[in-house]
Image (tube, rainbow, N blue to C red):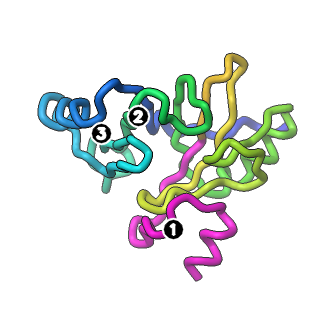
Amino acid sequence: MNKPIQIRGLFETHLTVSDLQRSIRFYCDIVGLSLAYEMPERDAAFFWIGNPSHSSIRSMLGIWSIGTTPISMRLHIAFEVEKIKDLLSAPQQLKAKGIMPLSFFGTESTEPSVIGWMPAAAIYFKDPDGHLVEYLTMLDEKIKRPDLGIVSWSEWLSQNR
């Protein structure tokens, strides 16, 4: 049996909020987080916790207006995976253990999804209670591609050659 994916640390967590703009002000002005990205079309915002350019002290908080979370999210936790090769092997390892690997959009997937604005690659799956778990690896910051949105790993590779 394969060893479990090597977890580097907790990368992100997400909360649902009743008023997105009020919560953005709260997390910026009161808590002191740095707004990383706002997605008005999805009623969501993301904040860096720590210094986003130092991978050893970086994590993220996502806030979503009630009813707008992706993949019918109940609760969500993301673990940062240090090596891209580990992330790329995760779908096969999950399937071998009877767990369905999911894309960002909640469909079964054999490869990670890439979030172009970060940029990061991620594969998702559900725990026994239906909570969404994510393995995520940050990609080279020099190749941010918010114009691509969220794409498959193979599409990301073809768009960045």
Residue occupied by mark 3: 49
Mark closest to the chain's N terminus, 2 or 1: 2
Residue occupied by mark 2: 64
Q: Given contact means CB atoms under 8 Å apart, are the residues at marks 2 and 1 in contact? A: no
- The residue type indicated by label 3 comes to Ile
Residue at screen point 44% across, 45% down:
42
Which quarter of the image is occupied by the N terminus?
top right
Alpha carbons under labels 2 and 1: distance apart: 21 Å
Residue 6's place in the image compared with 132, above or below, is below
Residue 116: x and y in percent read 48, 62
> Mark 3 or 1, which is nearer the eye?
1
Which label sits on residue 78?
Answer: none
Most extreme residue toward the left is 29
> Mark 2 or 3, which is nearer the eye?
2
Residue at screen point 53% across, 24% down:
75
Mark closest to the chain's N terminus, 2 or 3: 3
> Label 2: how many residues lie within 10 Å, few (<14), some (14-19) or many (20+)?
many
Task: Please state the extent of the stretch shown in magenta in the rendering.
Answer: 135-161
**In the structure shown, which secondary structural element does the residue marked by tag 1 occupy?**
helix
Residue 31: x and y in percent read 18, 29
Q: Given contact means CB atoms under 8 Å apart, are the residues at marks 3 and 1 in contact? A: no
- The residue type indicated by label 2 comes to Trp
Looking at the image, residue 87 sits to the left or right of residue 98; the answer is left
Alpha carbons under labels 2 and 3: distance apart: 17 Å
Alpha carbons under labels 3 and 1: distance apart: 24 Å
Residue 100: x and y in percent read 79, 37
Based on the displayed image, in which of its 4 quarters is residue 47 positioned? top left
**In the structure shown, which secondary structural element does the residue marked by tag 2 occupy?**
strand
Is 160 a magenta residue? yes
Residue occupied by mark 1: 148
Residue 120: x and y in percent read 50, 56
